Structures are given as structure tokens and as C-alpha cells.
Image (cartoon, coloured by chain):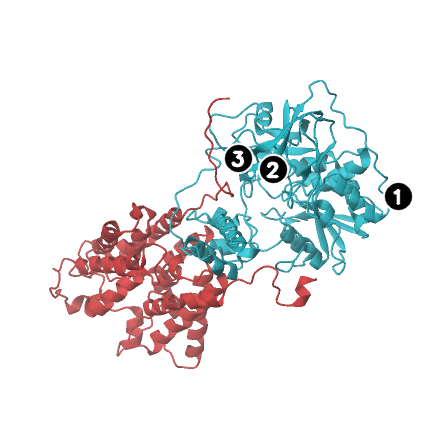
């Protein structure tokens, strides 16, 4: 017999073809229609903002990443795209870039890189921008006639006040209903199709839903999380609406603002969500309740970001409380001898 | 019919690859020039050698006796002359004292006649005695001495025998072939075990991917006893003792307890067939059907192989290895053992020999855990492999025990599903070894 080299490994000797890298890139793939829609609605500004936030994430990961080739796992691209999705089209690009840098550096790498972080990096980046530049991040452009026109002062220089013209600011459906002297209820169909004001990825709830369902079918996101969030938002907002405490109908709540994006893409970040399905129900229910409370009584028109970040912080506790019951430690005596 | 079948929770669906050999009837492998019989072929204390170099042995002769309660006899699987008793490579990856026998090329290899009482005429207690004398161990993979299993504790009466024909490991088809080719032996063995236990009910569990075996076992089932066939969903590890009991009876074996704690006893179909053979021809456990499969062997098939045959001789008889052979495994791909030497002998517990090509067992790079929870959804004993894996990597073994490492049966489901390719069950096997070493120290 010729010299043959065989390897010696511990069992199991076969592996499922699933890989973390594949999961990450399939998330990116599922975002393509949403990205296309944002370009359709907001023109070249959408490309610029998404590009700037992604560039910020990739550069930071490349410079400070803990593993070699850590860019290839796709997680930094997802952070960049998701961050861009929750920014308004007219935001100065340097801010989007800075948000990406902050999100990856302080949201992920400082904890030890992929898999170690407590908070969703994209949302942490956005929270940073919200705190640092409250005006720029809540200035939503009005859809202009000219598709090619920039949606705002994208090219404002760092730390210079961008020239924001009042005429260019629109408002989001949530904002109109909550803060305006003349509240208007935007039809739910418009919310689903995306022909409303808002951040880049907030606007087409329908496409986000489609992308999320695609991921759920492929097993690349845990469906328990979005389902429990949406269910919880629907139930709690329904109760408050019925009691006359809230101007938002449950259907309006479901399809407005960043809820769909948050429920399907942000909260489902595997690293920052609970590991058990039972934990995911608790996690989602908590997010839903917080979203409803912030939207109705908070000082902001939207509450998805803070709701998710707050529940992210509770994940270790949820995990501890929802550990699986080991086999053969039955709850009732009847179950051991059936 | 598959929609309403009982099953257990969690588990995984590895590609089956059973089509490589499931249709190939078993054939006898030619006797090799030399056989190597380790004194340790079972769980428990190694047997004590009864022969010395130069002794002539016939096929079926006892060459080593059981030492202690949990131990098993070893018989010679061929006629020949004892060459030596020496340390020899063992499939477990260690060196073990083994009896080397030069096979007599002129022998007819007929077994030395042996007188065995009729199974129905001796007292039931004597049945397990005969089974012990024949060196029968569980052929499902663990090789636990069968006679020990057949004497459950007095305070834990067994009321059902579960016969394991699920064969959930990918590639393996030896149990499948046993059921197709020797259904009478399987049923006869069940009858004998039922009598030894003094009960009347047996359930044969067979996965749905073996419809012909389900049909044959149903057709040949005795009418005077309560023996039924339960088709099972195809899912790994259906054949694990606790999963099978849960599926068939709904009873959950308490953590750390034996199946008899819930009144059940599990025997593999190949084991019951070999028990029947003892009382039919007097033949002790000296050979079995093994599946030789994988894309790394030229002629996959099922073979009746005498124990002690060297891996090299088996591969030669199967046409040799292909160019892209990457790994040789004894047992199934989920729980089997990698082999480093072509000189290791096949043993009682060797249900299959896999020669895996590079494509079949390729692995991707290990990435950090992303806490996706897929391992938790896969674990059939409901542990948290993600947490235990993190603890293993920082060598916090005691905390792993607190997280029920002891309940882990190393089935490999967590490692199989992990998208980051973290070698979870490998870490657990290592941690278990480390813990027992610490306990011993």
C-alpha cells in the first residue's frame, strides 16, 4: 500500500454545511431589495449614506479587528448597512462615517470582537449620533421632484453646521401624529409600500418583512424574536388605543417607524439576543412593551432603538432565567413513568 | 404516516449516505493470515488471558475470561496458533494487551462443537449465564456486557424490552442488513431475552428510512408474544438509549439513572441476533456484519468479519482506498473513532468502517461563537453547549459539571450544527477526561 496520509480528528467527523460567514452574507443579500427601495425613494443620497456608514465600519474592523481577515465574515458590512438604514438621507456623510466607526469600535471591538458584544453595534452607532447630532439625525428630507438631487447637505464638512433649509424638512408619520399641531394619520398601505418620510430603511416595511421571512425560512434568524416583538407591540398598543390613551392604532404602530427594521434585523442579531427560544419570547415581549411606552409617552417620536438597546442589556439575565431543563429532570413525577 | 410518528425533541438531520451500502447483501470476508484480539473489547474491566504463546486454539475457543462483574469473555474468531500476547494498537487510540493469533491456513474454520442447553428448558436465570459465557456485548456501539443488562436491580422491574433497529448514524447499514437477512434470529433473540426477564412485551424501533426492514420484521414477528414494530422518524440520535425509550414509551430516564429506572431495557437488533445464534449453534460472539462505506473505499459493502481482522485486510478485501482518502473511522461519522494505524483490529463494537474522502469530512475555519443558539436547539438532552463550550475553553471544568456536563453523551449534535465550527463535543470529551483525571489525582 502506498504512503497515505489520513487525519485524526475527534467525532463528529461530518459537519452541517451551515457557516457563520454564510449566515452573515445571506443577511446582506436579504437587505438588497430594501437598499434598492431606499435608492428608489431617496436618490443618490441613499447610496452615499449607506456607503459612508459601511466604509466607517469596514475601516475600523480592518484597522482594529482582532482576527485576521475578520472583514470576510461579513458582520462589519451588516453593521454598516443597518446603521445607514436608520439614518436620514440628508445626513452629512462624515457623521454617517463616524457612526460606523463608533458602532464597530465601541459597540463590538472593545468587547473583544465578533460574538463578544452586549449591544447591537449598529444601534449603538446610531445612539451615539443621536446624542451627538440630534438635529441632523432627525431632519428628514422632503421627497423632491428631481431624483438626482441630493436629499440634504451630504457633503457638509466635519464640525461645520450643515445648511439645512426648513423647506426641505419633512416629517415622519410618527412625528406628524405625535408632535404636529395638525395631526394626520398616514394610511397603513403607504407605510407598507414606503412612500413616506423617514430614515433610509424605515420606509418600506413590506420589503423588510419579505427579507426577514426569507431569513427565517433559511434558519438564519430566529423567528421567535420578530414574532414576539410584533405581537407584543400589537397587543399593548391595542390596549392603550382602546383605552383612549394613545393616538396610534395597532396597525399603524406595526408598520410605522423603524419597528419592522428593528424587529427583523436589529433585535435578531444573534450575538445580542437570548440563546433559548423561551428567552427570545421574553426578549421580544419586553422590546414590544418598551417601544409602545416610548412612542406614546416618551420625548421622542420613535422608541425602537432604545427599546432594543435596553433589552440587549438584559440578555444575560434572560439567558440565566431561561436555561433549558436537562433531560431526565422531569417537572412532574408522572412524566418519568408514563 | 410520518406526520404522527412519535419522536424525541431536538436532534439533527445529517445527510444519510446509506444508499452506498443498504442494498448490498452481506458477504463473508476471507479469513486473514493473522488476527489480533485485544483483551479489552467492551466497557468494564479487560478480560484475563487464558492462553500462552504456542497454544493451539480452535475457532470459538475461550482465550480470555471475564474479570469481575462488568467484564466479558473473549473467544478466538479463527483456528490457529497463539503467537504472542503483546501491546498492540487499539481502535481507541491507545496500546492494549492483545492476543496475536496466526491463523491456520489449512483449517476448515469450523467452530469447535459446543453443548448449549435448550433456551426453553433451562431456568430463566441460567439464560444470562449462557449469554455471559458466549461473550455477548451490546453491538450498538457501546459494547456493554449484555448479561449485566439482563439482571436489572430487584427494585426496578423491567416491563418492556425495546429492540433498537433505528441505526441513526449516517452510512451504517449493518443493523439494516441484519434485520433483512436474519429476521428469525432477531426475533428468536427477543424471545430469549423476554424469557430471561420474565416479561412478554417488546417493541422494535426502526427508522422510516428502512421500510423493507420494517416490513420484514412485522411479517416475521411471533404471534404468541406482544412484539410490535414501531416506525420512527429519521433523526439523529434516535438510536441513543434514552431517546429511544422516550420515543417508544414516553418515559424519560432520570438523569444519572439506568433505563431500568423507568422499567425499560434496550438491546440492539444485532445483539439479539447473536444471542439467538448462541442457543442455536453454540457459536459465541466471534464475528458480526460490519458496513464498510464512504467515498474513500473502492467497493463499499456489508461484510461478515471475524473480530481481530486487521483494518488493512478489510480494506484490501474491499478493493483498497481511493486517491482522495482523508480519514478512516470506526463506527459512524457522528460518534466514531478516527484510526491512525492500518494495523488496528476490528472489534465487537465495530459496526462500521468508514473511509471518508476529503469532500465528505472537510471542515471550515473556526470562528467565534455568535450565540445563535443552534446547539441548544440541537441538544437531545437539553443542555446548553454554547455555555459549556465557553467554559471549556477557559478550563473551568467544575462549572461545566454544574452545567450538567455529566449528562452529555457526546452525540456530536452541537458540533454538527455549529455555524462557527466550534468543536463543542470534542471540548466536552476532553473536559470529561480532564475531570476524571483530576478526580483520580
Does residue A285 appear left or right of residue A294 in this picture? right
Q: Nearer the viewer, residue A94 or A164?
A: A94
Q: Name the element at disc 3.
A: loop
Q: CA distance from mark 1 to mark 2?
A: 37 Å
Any idea which chain is the cyan one in this picture?
B
Residue B237 in picture, x, y percent from top left: 59, 48
Residue B343 percent coordinates (x, y): 56, 29
Question: For residue B172, which numbered disc appears in the image?
Answer: 2
Q: Secondary structure at mark 2?
A: loop
Residue A170 image point, x, y percent: 23, 67
Disc 1 element? loop
Chain letter tied to red: A
Foreground pick, B337 / B179: B337
Mark 3 burial class by Cα count in 10 Å: few <14, some 14-19, many 20+: many
**Which picture quadrant has residue A186?**
bottom left
Q: Which residue lies at the image location 69% right of the left edge and 38% below the top edge? A: B212
Q: Which chain does the residue under circle 2 lie in?
A: B
> Is residue B135 visible in the rendered structure shown here?
yes
> A324 or A163, which lies in front?
A324
Chain letter of the residue beneath label 1 in the structure image: B
A108 shown above or below B98:
below
A165 to the left or right of B217: left
How packed is label 2: few (under 14 Cα within 10 Å), some, or many (20 or more)? many
Question: Disc 3 marks which residue?
Answer: B339
Instruction: Let me know if residue B21 appears in the view.
Output: no
Q: Which mark is residue B121?
A: 1
Between circles 3 and 2, the one closer to the viewer is: 3
Q: Residue at x 63, y 53 (%)?
A: B243
* Subunit bearing disc 3: B
Does residue B29 appear to the left or right of B405 in the view shown?
right
Residue B337 sits above or below residue A48 on the image:
above
Amino acid at each position: 500500500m502506498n504512503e497515505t496520509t489520513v487525519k485524526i480528528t475527534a467525532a463528529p467527523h461530518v459537519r452541517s454545511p451551515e457557516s457563520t460567514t454564510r449566515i452573515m452574507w445571506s443577511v446582506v443579500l436579504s437587505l438588497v431589495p430594501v437598499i434598492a427601495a431606499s435608492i428608489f425613494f431617496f436618490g443618490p443620497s441613499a447610496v452615499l449614506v449607506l456607503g459612508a456608514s459601511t466604509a466607517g465600519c469596514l475601516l475600523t474592523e480592518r484597522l482594529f479587528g482582532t482576527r485576521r481577515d475578520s472583514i470576510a465574515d461579513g458582520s462589519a458590512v451588516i453593521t454598516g448597512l443597518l446603521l445607514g438604514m436608520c439614518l436620514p438621507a440628508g445626513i452629512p456623510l462624515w457623521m454617517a462615517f463616524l457612526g460606523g466607526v463608533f458602532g464597530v469600535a465601541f459597540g463590538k471591538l472593545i468587547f473583544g470582537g465578533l460574538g463578544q458584544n452586549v449591544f447591537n453595534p449598529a444601534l449603538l452607532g446610531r445612539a451615539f449620533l443621536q446624542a451627538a447630532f440630534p438635529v441632523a439625525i432627525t431632519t428628514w428630507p422632503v421627497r423632491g421632484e428631481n431624483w438626482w438631487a441630493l436629499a440634504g447637505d451630504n457633503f457638509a464638512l466635519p464640525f461645520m453646521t450643515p445648511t439645512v433649509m426648513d423647506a426641505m424638512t419633512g416629517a415622519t408619520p410618527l412625528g406628524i401624529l405625535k408632535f404636529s399641531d395638525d395631526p394626520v394619520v398616514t394610511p397603513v398601505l403607504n407605510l407598507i409600500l414606503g412612500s413616506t418620510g423617514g430614515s433610509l430603511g424605515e420606509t418600506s416595511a413590506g420589503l423588510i418583512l419579505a427579507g426577514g421571512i426569507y431569513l427565517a425560512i433559511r434558519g438564519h434568524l430566529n423567528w421567535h424574536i420578530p414574532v414576539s416583538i410584533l405581537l407584543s407591540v400589537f397587543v399593548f398598543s391595542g390596549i392603550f388605543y382602546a383605552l383612549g390613551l394613545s393616538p396610534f392604532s395597532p396597525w399603524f404602530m406595526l408598520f410605522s417607524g423603524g419597528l419592522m427594521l428593528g424587529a427583523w434585523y436589529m433585535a435578531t442579531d444573534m450575538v445580542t439576543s437570548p440563546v433559548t427560544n423561551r428567552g427570545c419570547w421574553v426578549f421580544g415581549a419586553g422590546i414590544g412593551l418598551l417601544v409602545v411606552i416610548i412612542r406614546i409617552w416618551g420625548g421622542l417620536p420613535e422608541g425602537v432603538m432604545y427599546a432594543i438597546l435596553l433589552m440587549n442589556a438584559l440578555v444575560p439575565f434572560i439567558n440565566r432565567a431561561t436555561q433549558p431543563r436537562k433531560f431526565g429532570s422531569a417537572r412532574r413525577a408522572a412524566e418519568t413513568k408514563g | 404516516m410520518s406526520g404522527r410518528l412519535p419522536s424525541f425533541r431536538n436532534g439533527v438531520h445529517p445527510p444519510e449516505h446509506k444508499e452506498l451500502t443498504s442494498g448490498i447483501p452481506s458477504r463473508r470476508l476471507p479469513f486473514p493470515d493473522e488476527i489480533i484480539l485485544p483483551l479489552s473489547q467492551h466497557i468494564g474491566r479487560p478480560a484475563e488471558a487464558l492462553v500462552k504463546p504456542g497454544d493451539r486454539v480452535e475457532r470459538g475457543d475461550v482465550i480470555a475470561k471475564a474479570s469481575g462483574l462488568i467484564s466479558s469473555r473473549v473467544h478466538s474468531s479463527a483456528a490457529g496458533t497463539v503467537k504472542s500476547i503483546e501491546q498492540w494498537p487499539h481502535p481507541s487510540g491507545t496500546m492494549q494487551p492483545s492476543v496475536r493469533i496466526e491463523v491456520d491456513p489449512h483449517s476448515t474454520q469450523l467452530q469447535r462443537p459446543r453443548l448449549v442447553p435448550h433456551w426453553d428448558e433451562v431456568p430463566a436465570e441460567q439464560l444470562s449465564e449462557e449469554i455471559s459465557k458466549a461473550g455477548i456485548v451490546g453491538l450498538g456501539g457501546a459494547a456493554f456486557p449484555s448479561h449485566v443488562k439482563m439482571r436489572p436491580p430487584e427494585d426496578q422491574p423491567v416491563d418492556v424490552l425495546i429492540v433498537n433497529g433505528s441505526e441513526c448514524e449516517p452510512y451504517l447499514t449493518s443493523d439494516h442488513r441484519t434485520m433483512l437477512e436474519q429476521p428469525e434470529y432477531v426475533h428468536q433473540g427477543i424471545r430469549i431475552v423476554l424469557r430471561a426477564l420474565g416479561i412478554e412485551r417488546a417493541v422494535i424501533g426502526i427508522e422510516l428510512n428502512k421500510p423493507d426492514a420494517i416490513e420484514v420484521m412485522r411479517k416475521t414477528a411471533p404471534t404468541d408474544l406482544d412484539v410490535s414494530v414501531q416506525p420512527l422518524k429519521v433523526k439523529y440520535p434516535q438510536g441513543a438509549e434514552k431517546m429511544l425509550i422516550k420515543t417508544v414509551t414516553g418515559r424519560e430516564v432520570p438523569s444519572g439513572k439506568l433505563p431500568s429506572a423507568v422499567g425499560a431495557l434496550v438491546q440492539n437488533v444485532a445483539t439479539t441476533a447473536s444471542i439467538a445464534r448462541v442457543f442455536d449453534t453454540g457459536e459465541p460472539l466471534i464475528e458480526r456484519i460490519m458496513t464498510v462505506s464512504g467515498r474513500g473505499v473502492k467497493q463499499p459493502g456489508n461484510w461478515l468479519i471475524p473480530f481481530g481482522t486487521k483494518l488493512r485486510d478489510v480494506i484490501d478485501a474491499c478493493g483498497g482506498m481511493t486517491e482522495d482518502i482523508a480519514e478512516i473511522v470506526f463506527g459512524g461519522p457522528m460518534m466514531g473513532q478516527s484510526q491512525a494505524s492500518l494495523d488496528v483490529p476490528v472489534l465487537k463494537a465495530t459496526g462500521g468502517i468508514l473511509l471518508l474522502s476529503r469532500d465528505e469530512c472537510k471542515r471550515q475555519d473556526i470562528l467565534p461563537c455568535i450565540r445563535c443558539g443552534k446547539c441548544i436547539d440541537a441538544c437531545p438532552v437539553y443542555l446548553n453547549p454554547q455555555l459549556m463550550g465557553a467554559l471549556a475553553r477557559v478550563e473551568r471544568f467544575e462549572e461545566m459539571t454544574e452545567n450538567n456536563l455529566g449528562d452529555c453523551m457526546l452525540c456530536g449534535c452541537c458540533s454538527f450544527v455549529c455555524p462557527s465550527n466550534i468543536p463543542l463535543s470534542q471540548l466536552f470529551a476532553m473536559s470529561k477526561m480532564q475531570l476524571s483525571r483530576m478526580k483520580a489525582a
